[in-house]
Amino acid sequence: MGFFTPMKKDFTFKGKTVDELKKMTLNELAQILPSRQRRKLKRGFTEQQKILLKKLRANEKNIETQCRDMIILPEMIGKIIKVHRGKEFIPVPIEQDMIGHYLGEFALTRKRVAHSAPGIGATRSSASLSVK
């Protein structure tokens, strides 16, 4: 018996390859996106989203944005966009699987809660400890 090597499957989004997606207009792309994204594209982009797209098309480096509601388009694939998280900007590398999602989905705003030891007076046993 020989080794089985699985063939690498090419990425497709609703039956379209990445190259086909990049050639589509926004109206054609909207037809294959889910309804929420389709409605958003139909209404048009906000001024901040237009600025972000202009920076992406100009191939600027170190793009920072607070547009967490921007839909990831095929032309963004391969770029790194720093998305605001509420306190700092998180670098988000845009991949093929992210098409149709929002930028904010990949920069989580909540951190995991890590509790330390209880303070003095928090329990009855800690009241008898010396404060040193």
Image (spheres, grey):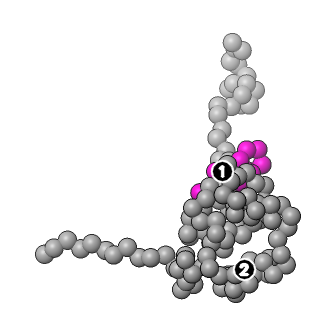
Structural crowding at the residue carrying mark 1, measured as other residues with C-alpha within 10 Å and reported as few (<14), some (14–19) or many (≥20): few
Q: Quadrant of residue 53?
A: bottom right
Please indicate, yes or no, whether residue 109 appears anywhere in the rendered image: no
The verdict on residue 32 being magenta is: no
121 up-or-down from 101: above or below: above
Q: Main secondary structure of the magenta part?
A: strand
Q: Quadrant of residue 28?
A: bottom right
The structure residue drawn at horizontal position 80% and vertical position 76%, both measured from the top left corner, is: 40
Distance (Cα) linking label 2 and label 1: 24 Å
For the point 67% across and 68% down, the residue is: 72
Q: Point out which mark residue 112 bears.
A: none
Q: Quadrant of the N terminus?
A: bottom left
The label on residue 61 is 1
Q: Which residue occupies the foreground of this view, 86 or 111?
A: 86
Residue found 55% across the figure and 76% down from its top: 18
At label 1, which amino acid type do we have?
Lys
**Disc 2 marks which residue?**
26
Q: Is disc 2 in contact with disc 1, using a CB cutoff of under 8 Å? A: no
Q: Amino acid at mark 2?
A: Leu
Q: Which residues are magenta?
A: 83-93
